[in-house]
Image (spheres, grey):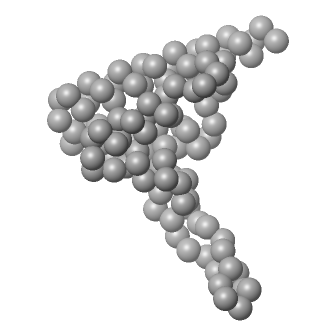
């Protein structure tokens, strides 16, 4: 991912960002080594304030990055927590799909 920013002279410079969403505090929390912080960040992603709100592309990228990085090497309890939150995310997706179909 690339982030275009300007230096002191006003010229554009490009930097490479390793997070799924550049400069995102949520992205750094999802990819954190601290299991509690990662689970809290997944809660923010997987449960929307409005159940019928569809996930954004940034949400999908963050969840994918978390699954790629954390699922294999995580302890059993952390994996169970990730799977539980992923189920809640799928419920959110289902609710958003049916809500948009009824419009």
Residue ID at (40%, 25%):
85
Residue 67 visible in this rendered orientation of the protein:
no
Q: In this view, does 86 lie above or below 37?
A: above
The residue under the point 47% across, 50% down is 27
Q: Can residue 30 be seen in this view?
A: yes
Q: Determine the residue positioned at 50% across, 34% down.
A: 45
| Rendered location of residue 12, percent (x, y) | 70, 81
Q: In which quarter of the image is the C terminus?
A: top right
Residue extending furthest toward the top: 102
Q: Which of the 4 quarters of the picture holds residue 10?
A: bottom right
Total marks shown come to 0
List x then y, in percent, for residue 91: 52, 15
User: Is 81 situated left or right of 66 in this image?
Assistant: left
Query: How far across and how far down the image is residue 23, in percent?
Result: 54, 60
| 38 relative to 98 in the view: left or right | left
Left or right: 8, with 67 as reference point: right
Question: In which quadrant will I find the N terminus?
Answer: bottom right
Q: Is 74 placed above or below 20 here? A: above
Coordinates of residue 42 in the picture (x, y in percent): 42, 35
The one nearer the camera, 24 or 57, is 24
| Residue extending farthest right | 103
Q: In which quarter of the image is residue 11?
A: bottom right
Q: In this view, does 39 lie to the left or right of 19?
A: left
């Amino acid at each position: 991912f690339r982030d275009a920013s300007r230096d002191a002279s006003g010229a554009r410079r490009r930097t490479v960002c390793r997070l799924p969403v550049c400069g995102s505090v949520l992205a750094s929390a999802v990819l954190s080594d601290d299991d509690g912080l990662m689970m809290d960040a997944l809660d923010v992603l997987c449960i929307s304030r409005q159940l019928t709100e569809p996930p954004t592309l940034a949400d999908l990228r963050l969840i994918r990055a978390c699954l790629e990085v954390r699922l294999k090497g995580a302890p059993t309890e952390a994996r169970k927590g990730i799977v539980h939150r992923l189920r809640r995310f799928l419920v959110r997706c289902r609710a958003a799909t049916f809500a948009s179909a009824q419009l």
